[in-house]
Image: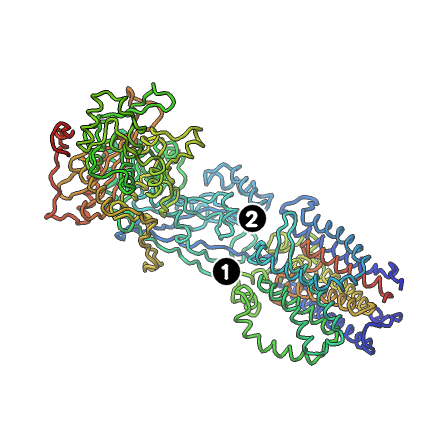
Amino acid sequence: MNAYSWRHFDPVLLVVVLALTGYGALLIYSAALPRGAIGIVVTEPVIRHIAVAGVGTLAMLLVARTNYRVLDTFGGVAYIVGILLLAAVLFLGSDRFAASRWFDLGFMVVQASEIAKLLTIIGLAKFMADHRNRMHEARTFVASLGLAAAPAALVLIEPDLGGAIMFLLIWVVMAALGGARLRNFVILGAVLAALIPFGMVAGFSDYQRDRIKIFIDPSDDPLGVAFNVLQAETSVGSGGLLGKGLTEGAQTQLDFLQTQQTDFIFSVLGEEFGFVGAIALFALVLLLVMRGLRAILRAPDTLGQLMVAGITGMIAFQVFIAVAVNIRLLPVTGLPLPFLSVGNSSLFVLFVALGIVQSVLLRQNER
Amino acid sequence: MRLLGDRQRPVIMTSPAGDEERLGLKVLLLGTVILVLFGILTIQLMRLQIFRHEEFEIRAATNRLRLIDTPAERGLIYARDGTLLAENVPGFAVTVVAADVPPDRVHEVAEALSPLLDIPAFEIETQILERHRSIDPFQPIVLAADIDADLVFEIGTLQGSVPGMRVESISKRHYLLGPLFSQVLGHIGPITVEEFEELRADRYRLADRIGQTGVEAAYEDVLRGVPGREEVEVNASGRAVRTLAAEPPTPGQGLVLTIDPQLQTEVEILLREGMGGSLFAAAVVVDVHTGEILAMVSLPNYDNNIFSQRVDEAQLSAIFENEARPLVNHAIADQFPPGSIFKVITGTGALQDEIIDPDQRIRSLGAIGVQNVLDPRITYVFRDTTAGDFDFVTGLAESSNVYFWYLAGGSPFRRPVADELLTPEQQEEQEKLTRAGVIGGQQDFEGLGIEGLSKWGNLFGLNELSQIDLVGEASGFIPDADWKVRTFGEGWGQGDSYNLGIGQGFVAVTPLQMVMATAAIANGGNLLQPHVVRAVLDTDGNVLRTIGPRVRRQLDVEPENLALVREGMARSVLAGTSGNAYFSEMQIAGKTGTAEFGKEPTFRDLFPTHGWFLGFAPYEKPQVAVVVFHQLGAGFLSAETGGLILKAWAELSGSIDPDHPAPPQRAALEGDRFVDLDADSGP
């Protein structure tokens, strides 16, 4: 059957992604603006962000052209590569902010978990597609959970609690769509709930415990992480309905905000573009999610469905968490905001992931 | 939900039949969950940005919440007996936070402060502008670290009108005994902008002072404490209006030095009196069992309080331009040729490596000649000041160069000489010497050589840091054959061994290294790590931890060999070159050194010399070792200082035992210097 056709390419998806990336470039421009700069000063992070988007678009088209079914063959390999990457970063990675999450390649820094996330989605999709008739069995259910838990555990050691949670959320979305039974989820939830107190004591590093504790009671450590949370909240709150305007946010420009190009980029948005700017962001993200859900329904096979579902879920949940930590809905976890935060590897992986979605769409009539 | 459900949706063949509907439902559910999550975000955003907007706007505008590091009180330093040596006294500093100075008012601020602080306006302006552009414009700049009390009020009244400026109360370091402890304690000083970039991560402020030398630098981590933190709200001109939260600083821990201030005082006086024409001098007294430094003096010293006060350019340049480098602790940071004090190293090595039987005599005729290997017509003559037949103890006591040249480099006639080449007189002489058991004449004798010499120099720690708890220590230098080839492109010669064996030539050591080597000889072979701090105290003065003896290396030397070296040193005081060190109340041991230095002879064919003395006391049960060094001096003069220092120690420590006075001094036996070769019986 012939039917791989560019007619099915989703231009909306591409436009939304480029709009989000452009939005990010604006915010990075503002956050990275040197103090006392006169006129427009385009700094290196902005240029890199745009450059990665350009290269990413090309990669997206290339991936779209490639039949995603090659991943049926290479799914297992992809998964193992992801695990190896995460293991390697623990030994070889460079420490920034007390966590070893990055490979320093000299010309760019690569965050291993961002790549591993996509590779794990591929691996999970392959496994669940192969076992689609047995996903309702508890054994297969637990096995797939194991496949997601392994990278999650490695990321947790880094330590990166947010990253670990992302792996598990992706698994939930994929397992639910892949045929797992509700009953199994309920049992799993009960077991996890019972383990929480134990996990709080043994499973988390001091830094993670601190962050959770601070979230629960900010007055506990008003001067450490909580200072950032407080400043983020102040930034967003002071933005108001319309915001103070690009590069006009005092909180941003006076560096009250820390890691404002990454974890706290939403605060820059909140301060400078206000509530309206935030709603615009949500609208774009929701449009992207809907196009993703549409792609799930159009996917010609289980492998395609599950990959698209995993990718869509990954983007949606990561945006949610990254925004929530800025407005004091969740403890600080250090997740980049997809498409907006500085982070070359993260951005590039997103483009490749959407390439896979397009690849599935192009072959919707092919079986 | 048009986007979700599509009319043209194809049948999904690969899914089990009937699952299609379920998939649609699940996708719908996923979409709903995501929608709800974003709904939650929207509600929270509405709360923050719309309902509570004004509250946050005020917080952001007036605001400026700021995290300020508050420095901890620096730890106090005490002498061994509890005498306070370093304390903190209140003072006032004028600082500016660049971020609080609007760019268009920088000039005005600089002009206002310039006359009061006596700093050129452009300098203030430059500093503020530089900080503006830096990554941390909130970091206060210190314009004046120590202003007079009467200025405080005057400048204080300006605080309202000069944005960003603040008069801060600070604590200044005060050293109660000033120069007496300056090189040991060192001083603290400002952090440069370059250093600050490195130190930021450790929560240093640009306005902080950091240990620069001595104990202040070596124990910076302990003395500094942990800075506190305050979250304050500041107003538009940067003044703190409200402290929201504070985490108090943890004061630095205190230190107790090993140094006894009374002995230190005595040593300083004695060393100074013995200086004569020396530019600088140093002396160290160490406990031979613990490695504790009981006194350490380097002259000239300086008053380390001048670094705590407002910069006095004249005073500072006097120190920096002084040829004798008062800021340098010459006892640890400077290295010199050791001269004859090195013979204790050569001697120990030669005994242990069985180069020589201690009773074996070697004949010195007052000089030794070495033929050039390539050109036999050239003979290098090494001159000595004594002559006679020396065994180990007398050789060391009288510091016979010839004896130690044999031990170091062997006899000058290393190749067996065919008997027929000797004249009958020479042959007869040789037979007599052999019969009398004296090495000399044309006899073959093998010394330690460069391998043995450098091995023992290294073992005694003369080519490595002693790891004393002070900064700026020099590592000394012991040459080896490879080094000479690499550096000069020529091989190690016998003459080089001769030089090294008596501490001349390429070798260089610090006074501290030599006193630790002496301590090892005195204590039975333990090369200790010297230290000047014996305890760390908490803020209430309780001992947190003590610093005990640490053996760096156990020298593999037979006790009887070390005993022989000690005996030679004791005899050196009683009937040898160290006679000036003698005092009758206690028997001590010592060794002088007069080390040539410089490239040009200054007087006739004589090179200028440094004076050295090593010693320990009491001879029978060693407790302390001493080293004395005088730049441009002589060993016999340094010996006098060294003896007086040991005597001062004996008196202060109450170690004098009236029942065990020193044996009387006697002259080296002039008449019996040579064995009578014509006598019938052997040696």
Q: Badge 2 sits on which subunit?
A: B
Q: Position of residue A26 (x, y in %)?
A: 72, 52
Discs 2 and 1 share one subunit:
yes
Using the image, tell me which numbered label, if any, was put on residue B137: 2
Would you say residue B327 is visible in this rendering?
Answer: no
Q: Position of residue B459 (x, y in %)?
A: 34, 43
Q: Position of residue A145 (x, y in %)?
A: 66, 72
Q: What residue would you read off at disc 1?
A: B243
Q: Which amino acid type is shown beneath numbered disc 1? A: Thr
Quarter of the image where one finds residue B682: top left
Give the foreground label among 2 and 1.
Answer: 2
Q: Is residue B631 above or below residue B520?
A: above
Would you say residue A132 is visible in this rendering?
Answer: yes
Q: Secondary structure at mark 1?
A: strand
Q: Which amino acid type is shown beneath numbered disc 2? A: Pro
- Work out how far the residue at label 2 is from the one at label 1, CA to CA, in angstroms: 20 Å
Using the image, tell me which numbered label, if any, was put on residue A309: none
Q: Secondary structure at mark 2?
A: loop
For image coordinates 41% across by 35% down, the residue present is: B313
Residue toward you, B224 or B106: B224
Q: Badge 1 sits on which subunit?
A: B
Q: Position of residue B20 (x, y in %)?
A: 82, 75
Q: Residues within 10 Å of mark 1 (few under 14, many from 20)?
A: some
Quarter of the image where one finds residue B351: top left
Residue toward you, A293 or A229: A293
Circle nearer the N terminus (2, 1): 2
Q: Quadrant of the N terminus of chain A?
A: bottom right
